[in-house]
Image: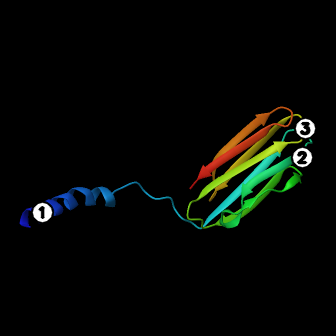
């Protein structure tokens, strides 16, 4: 019994600092997230997909560009995603800004080009 207790205490002494000093968890928020989509042509986006307040999927269609929406979230898993498809020729771009910091910005080119941005807090 004494030997088992000693091993258990030794194991706890080794693993406890690792558990306490493990990787930092993502900040659960609340966060202000700004999703933006724009194009260098007069085209509109045929589809825009993003996560709204509290990570609810949103998919407005035939969206005039530029498109900007701000959401506030305290999601347990703060992952942000945005995609859009161009309705014509030209470049289409997206940007995700979280709490005032640009987290991702991408551009795609061509007929019916699709662009995507992702970020995590």
Residue nearest the viewer, comparing 20 with 36: 20
Tell me: residue 2, above or below residue 85: below
Residue sitting at 86 percent across and 34 percent down?
A: 90
Q: Which residue is mark 2?
A: 44
Residue 76 position in % (x across, y down)? 56, 65
Q: Are marks 2 and 3 in contact (CB under 8 Å)?
A: no
Q: Which residue is mark 1?
A: 4
Q: Are marks 3 and 1 in contact (CB under 8 Å)?
A: no
Residue sitting at 58 percent across and 59 percent down?
A: 78
Q: Are marks 2 and 1 in contact (CB under 8 Å)?
A: no
Tell me: residue 85, above or below residue 90: below
Q: Which residue is mark 3?
A: 88
Tell me: residue 43, above or below residue 70: above
The answer to which of marks 2 and 1 sits earlier in the sequence is: 1
Q: CA distance from mark 2 to mark 1?
A: 69 Å
Give SS at disc 2: loop
Residue 15 position in % (x across, y down)? 26, 57
Q: CA distance from mark 3 to mark 1?
A: 71 Å
- Relative placement, left or right, of 121 versus 50 is left
Outermost residue on the front side: it is 1
Tell me: residue 81, above or below residue 16: above
The answer to which of marks 3 and 1 sits earlier in the sequence is: 1
């Amino acid at each position: 019994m004494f030997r088992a207790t000693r091993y258990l205490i030794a194991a706890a002494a080794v693993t406890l600092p690792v558990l306490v000093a493990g990787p930092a968890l993502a900040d659960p928020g609340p966060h202000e997230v700004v999703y933006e989509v724009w194009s260098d042509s007069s085209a509109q986006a045929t589809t825009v997909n993003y996560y709204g307040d509290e990570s609810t999927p949103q998919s407005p269609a035939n969206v005039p560009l530029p498109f900007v929406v701000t959401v506030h979230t305290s999601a347990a898993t703060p992952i942000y995603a945005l995609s859009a498809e161009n309705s014509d020729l030209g470049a289409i771009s997206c940007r995700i800004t979280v709490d005032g910091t640009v987290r991702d910005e991408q551009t795609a080119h061509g007929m019916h080009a699709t662009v995507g941005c992702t970020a995590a807090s």
